[in-house]
Image (cartoon, coloured by chain):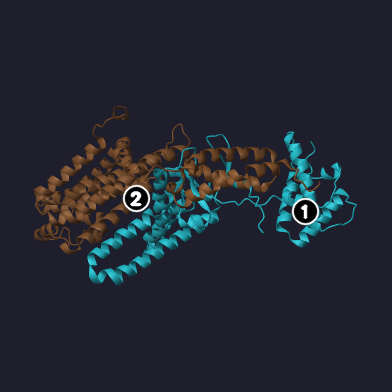
Amino acid sequence: MSGQITLKSHRFRLEREHDWEALEAILKILESGGKGALSDKQIIDFPRLYRSTLSSLSVARATSLDQGVILYLESLSARAYFALYGSQSGLLKRLANFFQKDWPQAAKALWKETIVAALLTLLAAIIAFILVSTNADWFYTFMPADLAGNRTPVASTESLRETLYHDGDADGLGTFASFLFSHNSRVAIFCFALGFAFCIPSAILLMYNGFVLGSFVAIFTQKQLGFEVGGWLIIHGATEIFAIILAGAAGIHIGKAVAFPGQRSRLDAAATAGATASRLMAGVIIMLFIASLLEGFGRQLITVDEVRYLIGIGSLIIWCLYFYGPRRTASSIS
Amino acid sequence: MSTIANSSDFDRRQLITPEGVNLEIRLASLGSRIAAYAIDQIIINGTLVALFFIVVLGGIATAASIATSIFILLSFFLRNFYFMFFEMGTKAATPGKRICKVRVASRGKARLTADAVFARNALREIEFNLPLSFLFVQGEAVDAWIAVLGLIWSGIFLFFPLFNKDRLRAGDLIGGTWVVRAPKAELITDLAAHSAKTGAPYLFSQEQIDAYGVYELHTLENVIRVNDPETVEDVAQRIRNKIRWSEGASGSDLDFLQAYYAALRERLETRLLFGVRRKDKFDDQ
């Protein structure tokens, strides 16, 4: 012990230290700013420094008893690992990818669940329609008072007709549309998230939606306004109800994976299902945005029934083609 | 001065990199996650209140309907996409998580994708807002009981992280993610280098050095780093007794401890090179 450094682990540390510091400097830039701030040399060095730090960690674990070095290297390697393997492709590329591939593929993959969700909504709508048509009192069971407004079975034909063509003044249309969007999106996210509880709450929410729809149509049909209410609904409903059905389908998909994971572990199955379903959900939010524009502006400004039908059915066809239409496979693109 | 925390093995999880090295990551504690969430909520709601005043004071007077729709849209995006926006970034953490030094990571080998972040945050709706909505239901008799049952049912989602060993939220389960600690460890000085510089003339016999193992070495390292006079004195005395140190107390207790640390580490590391890891003083190999 003559004052000179004899520990091998300390020499090891002195020799490698500058590599670790260089890596840390790169990480600092990456974590705060972005890739743009790195010099060319740093970009080239980054993977090499990462690997050399990993190997330092392995060596240190095997030969060094300096806790400080091991903890430091563990934290540094983890940071570098997350920076290297956690990074995403650019936002624009990701968006393009989403619209071209992820979204329609997710919708296509969940076609079974979509049919189930659509049937549930339709079934509930038919039940509510028949019940309200035979006995108008059922209307109050299905319809929350604040949603119905003055559209009740006792309202006169004229006042009902009025609600189809003039609700809300043209001044507040933007406000109305943005309110509709945020409300509907929350309902849709809710419908999706509830699927986690083994599908059942999602199914209930879908059916509830159907009940409201069916009883709503029923009171208008009784006053011979069936065709008109169809136009009023379809202009935005083709997009909005479709979106909520898709959200329900995404929820059912997750619930199914949690309840019946099959060969895989429950955790794995849930994570895989979650990835597909959440892609679809991101799309649902976009659909609801479009629907709220159609509802907030389109429905208020366009009062001709035929045009309303045209827009509604047209948008439905476009959505179906986009989701389920034939597309080029990956091999034919490349 | 801070000690090197020996966090329990309970929190440690393996993360094998593609290069085959096991990065031992540590799960975030429940406390830090709750704190992070609270900070994020404060930021979100504070911004909402500020936004509200800007709209009321500035916007309503000039263009009421546009101002209101902007407010509705902004508050929707803030509430729903605040978490997603930050967690999709390079740090994979919201400001609250950054303050609490935790981050979101993918559970498997796959990298953290935007889908996973979307899924884990969309589920916040049933984890936090659903119990909250049941809490504010007003009703009597049957309605009240239904609300209570709903609260218990939705409480399952809220307290989900308490009931699994990886502290996964329902959202983590669906997203395939978990929340891990992301501390930035500084490279602290090597104690052995320090003792080599002071170069106190302590000579220990082989037998004296062999009194302890790795566990004691690390404990000794913490004692030296904290440098609490009473503890240092106490520990120095114990070691002197244990190894029957006869040369009296030449030099300070701290110098003695540092010299013994360096000697012990050299001995243990040499044995490590020969494949023997002496865990503690009871480990006789």
A329 lies above or below A7: above
Q: Colour of chain A?
A: brown
Q: Secondary structure at mark 2?
A: helix
Q: Is residue A255 visible?
A: no
Instruction: Give the residue at x 30% y 36%.
Output: A108
Name the residue that disc number 2 marks.
A189
Identify the chain drawn in cyan.
B
Labels 2 and 1 positioned on one and the same chain: no
Chain under label 1? B
Crowd band around label 2 with a 10 angstrom C-alpha radius: few (<14), some (14–19), many (20+): many
Q: Quadrant of the N terminus of chain B?
A: bottom right
Q: Quadrant of the C terminus of chain B?
A: top right
A190 or B119: nearer the eye?
B119
Instruction: Give the residue at x 17% y 64%.
Output: A171
A248 or A40: nearer the eye?
A40
Position of residue B86 measured from the top left corner of the image (x, y, whole percent):
42, 52
Name the residue that disc number 1 marks.
B198
